[in-house]
């Protein structure tokens, strides 16, 4: 390869990475506040420039004080992402990309948390009948977390989702995965919060 070909290859590679990062932006924690209409619009965008303009518009539409330099909404979202990354990382997966991280970014910190720990898959039997020893999962656990949002700390959120209080439950396999137990409910709330985030 000649020097020119190497430079051309590097330039194209960097362009592809940048383009890919903008395409993937719609699944990033920053984009958790996309409304369903905005998600559809994002999918139609063909160029890097169009995607970049969309992202700028996304944040501008959510800026509660557009006449100032700061975008307080964006600052809150980025702070929640940092908090989620610090608390909920699983392996190399950033905490903001986990189920608990997603909920934290969208709904904020809960008013209270409850946690129950039990054997993996809720299996009460630790030893397989007729076999010597313990199964390989005998000492693995599953955690059930419930986040409670009440009027004491989440009054504005509860007005948006039109509920007197709210609970989100998670199934957590420590170090491996977590998932939202009542995901459909959360997604309905996420859409309401996303719509209300536009000022």
Image (cartoon, rainbow, N blue to C red):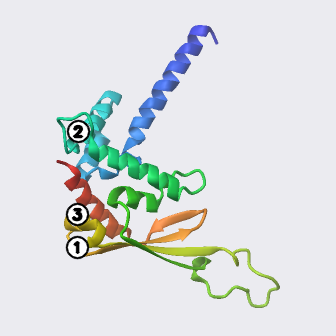
The reply to whether residue 114 is visible in this rendering is yes
Tell which circle, 1 or 3, labels the residue nearer the N-terminal end: 3
Question: Relative to 79, does residue 183 appear above or below in the rendering?
Answer: below
In the image, 116 versus 183, the foreground residue is 116
Q: Are marks 2 and 3 in contact (CB under 8 Å)?
A: no
Mark 2 and mark 1 lie on one chain; the one further toward the N terminus is 2
Residue at 32% from the left image edge and 32% from the top image edge: 52
Mark drawn on residue 163: 1
Q: x%, y% of residue 48?
A: 35, 29
Camera-nearest residue between 87 and 14: 87
Q: CA distance from mark 2 to mark 3?
A: 21 Å
The residue carrying mark 3 is 156
Q: Secondary structure at mark 2?
A: helix
- Tag 1's secondary structure? loop
Which quadrant holds residue 125? bottom right
Q: Residue furthest bottom?
A: 129
Which residue lies most toward the front here?
152
Helix, strand or loop at mark 3: helix
Report the disc number at residue 31.
Answer: none
Residue identifier under label 2: 60
Residue depicted at 44% across the width and 35% down the height: 20
The mark nearer the N terminus, 2 or 3, is 2
On screen, residue 136 versus residue 111, left or right, reads: right
Foreground mark, 1 or 3, reads 3
Q: Which quadrant would residue 128 be assigned to in this image? A: bottom right
Q: Is residue 176 above or below residue 7?
A: below
The foreground one among 184 and 111 is 111
């Amino acid at each position: 390869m000649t020097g020119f070909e190497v430079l051309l290859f590097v330039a194209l590679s960097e362009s592809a990475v940048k383009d890919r990062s903008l395409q993937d932006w719609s699944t990033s924690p920053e984009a958790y506040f996309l409304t369903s209409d905005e998600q559809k619009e994002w999918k139609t965008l063909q160029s890097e420039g169009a995607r970049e303009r969309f992202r700028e518009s996304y944040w501008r539409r959510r800026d509660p004080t557009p006449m100032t330099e700061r975008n307080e909404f964006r600052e809150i979202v980025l702070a929640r992402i940092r908090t989620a990354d610090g608390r909920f990382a699983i392996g190399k997966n950033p905490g903001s990309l986990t189920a608990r991280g997603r909920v934290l970014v969208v709904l904020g910190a809960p008013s209270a948390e409850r946690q129950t720990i039990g054997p993996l898959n809720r299996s009460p039997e630790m030893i397989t009948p007729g076999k010597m020893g313990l199964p390989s999962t005998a000492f693995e656990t599953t955690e059930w977390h419930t986040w409670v949002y009440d009027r004491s700390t989440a009054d504005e959120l509860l007005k948006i989702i039109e509920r007197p209080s709210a609970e989100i439950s998670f199934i957590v396999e420590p170090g491996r995965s977590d998932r939202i137990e009542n995901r459909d409910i959360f997604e309905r709330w996420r859409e309401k919060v996303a719509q209300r985030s536009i000022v």
